[in-house]
Amino acid sequence: NKKILMTPGPTNVPERVLKAMAYPVMHHRTDEYSALFGEFSERLKYVFQTRNDVMTFPAAGTGGLEAAVINLFSPGEKIIAVSIGVFGDRFASIAQQFGVDVEKIDIPWGSGADIDAIRKAVRDEHTSILVTHNETSTGAYNDIREIGKLAKEKGLLFVVDAVSSLGGLELKMDEWGVDVVISASQKALMSPPGLTFISLGEKAWDRAAMSTIPKYYWDIKKARDYMKKEKPQNPYTPAVSLIAATNESLKMIQEEGIENVIERHSNLAEKFRIEVEKMGLRLFVQNGYRSDVVTSIDVGDGAARLKREMEELHGIVISGGQGDLKGRIVRIGHMGCVDEKMIDMTVNAMQDCMNRMQGA
Ligand code: PMP
């Protein structure tokens, strides 16, 4: 019995992508693999909307965040980390683990960062700013374009966690002046979990050359050197089958066109929010900060039951709250391989569950 994942990741993987993963495993030091990896890395640039290289590592998105920290910074270096939820906290604590001196800006959960709050916190000694694009734990997003302008004005290296936004929310790395973007395979890129991606602009490569944190596996310069060989390769055994799968997802995104993909997400999210409010339910995130890839709904004590019955009665998997929001909200992901029919099914199933819960 096939279940639908209306979760904020991992998300549903299209048949085409699953089939690409089922091909016999290629050896990674062959021309065949180099051709695949070269093609795949070019497709990533299209989705990142950048001319910079995008490096791929077999890992969860958290690995990509760690890779960013250990390649860019040095112990004692002063940076700003903006947190609007669990993943903003995580990025800040990774940096702290490596001895980076983090000034954290904590925004109340359910909102995005206020640009003036960031402006006030920045001092000359800060070199960089870490920001989560889509805060998956709350369903709020940060305005990357606006923060990018501030980062540029203040000369800060701008590092964005786009694990749950890339391919779902508009993100123009080059045009918006983002220096580093990190993402992963299992969310809006509608692929299985297991790959993380990191792209650095020129300014970021200069910083990377100064970083004194030790690294071996996570050496992104080494990854780039191997990728730049005449026949693109990786320093260590890559996740060949996942690359074949994700290459197919990227191809699907290119076929649809990134602008159309973003617009589809925006239309479906808007439709879903309207339906949720029609049901008399309360959206957790403040108006103006609601993300188009995940919607969180404040259902009070009913969260656990709603989540359970959506899965048991309707085969639709949704997520609960994380951190302080555990047991209070449900989170519904609408990213990657989603269409109107899936939104309708989710809305109908939720209505049925709510009726049961209210004893109707
Ligand atoms: N950052 C964000 C914004 C995320 O949504 C997630 C995953 N939910 C992560 C980081 C961590 O990714 P992973 O679970 O793949 O380590």
Image: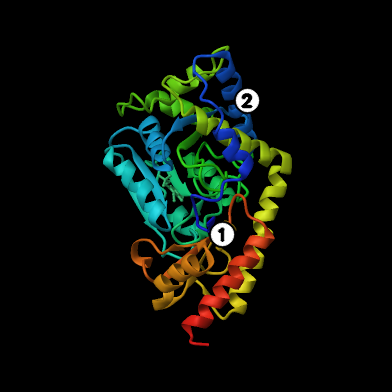
**On screen, residue 1 above or below 252:** below
Q: Position of residue 180 (x, y in %)?
A: 50, 37
**Residue type pointed to by label 1:** Ser
Q: Which residue corresponds to the image point at 32% horizontal and 37% vertical from the top-left?
A: 77
Q: Nearer the viewer, residue 329 or 310?
A: 310
**Residue type pointed to by label 2:** Glu
**On screen, residue 263 above or below 129:** below
Q: Quadrant of residue 37?
A: top right
Q: CA distance from mark 1 to mark 2?
A: 31 Å
Q: Position of residue 213 (x, y in %)?
A: 31, 29
Circles 1 and 2: CB atoms closer than 8 Å: no
Q: Farthest residue toward the front?
A: 1
Is residue 36 shown left or right of residue 182? right
Q: Position of residue 31 (x, y in %)?
A: 58, 14
Q: Position of residue 341 (x, y in %)?
A: 67, 62
Q: Quadrant of residue 53?
A: top right
Q: State the residue position of label 2.
A: 39
* Callout count: 2
Is residue 89 shown left or right of residue 169? left
Q: Nearer the viewer, residue 227 or 79?
A: 227
Crowd tier of the residue under label 1, counting other residues whose Cα lies within 10 Å: few below 14, some 14–19, many 20 or above: many
